[in-house]
Image (cartoon, grey):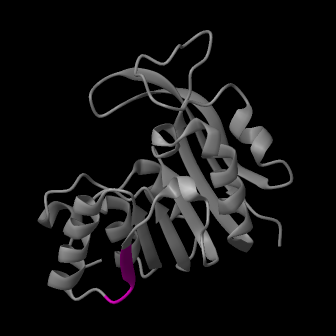
């Protein structure tokens, strides 16, 4: 990696779970779901993944497209896409969905996860980090959707759990809450 594009453009560093996943996932086709202004997508592109970055926010996508053009990046494409549609049209070796599900329509989350699974290549990976609301740790932020204990693990029955935990974490704003973190590998 020659240049850290995230710091060059004033973006936060890539999510720590994306960085960790890239220790075991070889560059492949990747989807960054809910990419915002592209911190994870840019990181993946610098590691030579072929990245598709999607988000419902047109101004975030415009910002990312500006960086792509400025840097003449050929291995990253950014599109405005409503993840609630659950209608991906390509298959990927790695789908990253960090801190995104909690902003979706709760009635669509099961369909979104099923769509992610259907569009993951055999032997490919899904990374999900999502807020939880549990009896022990009720979520202090009024997200449209939060996971319940074991819900994410249950949704990935039959996949290899490379990493799974439901630990306490801290949001950018300092709020403490429980997160489900999962890196799962689809059977070959």
In the rendered structure, the answer to whether residue 158 lies left or right of residue 122 reads right
Residue at x-position 41% and y-position 69%: 53
User: In the rendered image, is residue 24 in sight?
Assistant: no
Q: 127 and 2: which one is in front?
A: 127
Q: 15 and 70: which one is in front?
A: 70
Residue at x-position 51% and y-position 57%: 83
Q: Quadrant of residue 172?
A: top left
- Magenta region: 74-78
Residue at x-position 33% and y-position 90%: 74
Q: Quadrant of residue 52?
A: bottom left
Q: Magenta stretch: residue 77 in it?
A: yes
Q: Is residue 75 above or below residue 61?
A: below
Residue at x-position 26% and y-position 28%: 173
In the rendered structure, the answer to whether residue 114 lies left or right of residue 128 reads right
Q: Is residue 157 above or below residue 102?
A: below
Q: 45 and 119: which one is in front?
A: 119
Residue 23 x %, y %:
52, 64
User: In the rendered image, is residue 37 in sight?
Assistant: yes
How many labels sit on residues?
Answer: 0
In the rendered structure, the answer to whether residue 74 lies left or right of residue 16 reads left
In the rendered structure, the answer to whether residue 5 lies left or right of residue 94 reads left
Q: 178 and 23: which one is in front?
A: 178
* Secondary structure predominantly adopted by residues drawn in magenta: strand
Q: Quadrant of residue 103?
A: top left
Residue 168 x %, y %:
50, 24
Q: Is residue 54 above or below residue 93?
A: above
Residue 105 x %, y %:
53, 40
Locate the N terminus and report the quarter of the image it occupies.
bottom left
Q: Pick out the residue farthest to the right.
A: 158
Residue 102 x %, y %:
49, 37
């Amino acid at each position: 990696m020659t240049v850290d594009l995230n710091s060059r453009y004033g973006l936060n560093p890539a999510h720590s779970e994306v960085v960790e996943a890239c220790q075991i996932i070889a560059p492949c086709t990747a989807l960054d779901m809910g990419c915002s202004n592209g911190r994870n997508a840019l990181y993946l592109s610098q590691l030579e993944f072929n990245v598709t970055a999607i988000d419902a926010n047109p101004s975030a996508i415009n910002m990312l497209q500006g960086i792509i053009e400025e840097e003449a990046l050929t291995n990253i494409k950014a599109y405005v896409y409503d993840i609630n549609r659950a209608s991906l049209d390509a298959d990927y070796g790695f789908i990253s969905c960090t801190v995104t599900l909690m902003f979706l329509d709760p009635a669509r989350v099961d369909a979104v996860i099923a769509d992610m699974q259907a569009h993951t290549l055999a032997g490919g990976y899904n990374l999900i980090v999502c807020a939880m609301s549990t009896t022990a740790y009720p979520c202090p932020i009024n997200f449209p959707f939060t996971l319940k204990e074991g819900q994410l693990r249950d949704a990935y029955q039959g996949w290899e759990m490379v990493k799974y935990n439901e630990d306490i974490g801290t949001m950018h704003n300092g709020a403490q809450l429980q997160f489900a973190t999962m890196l799962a590998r689809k059977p070959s």
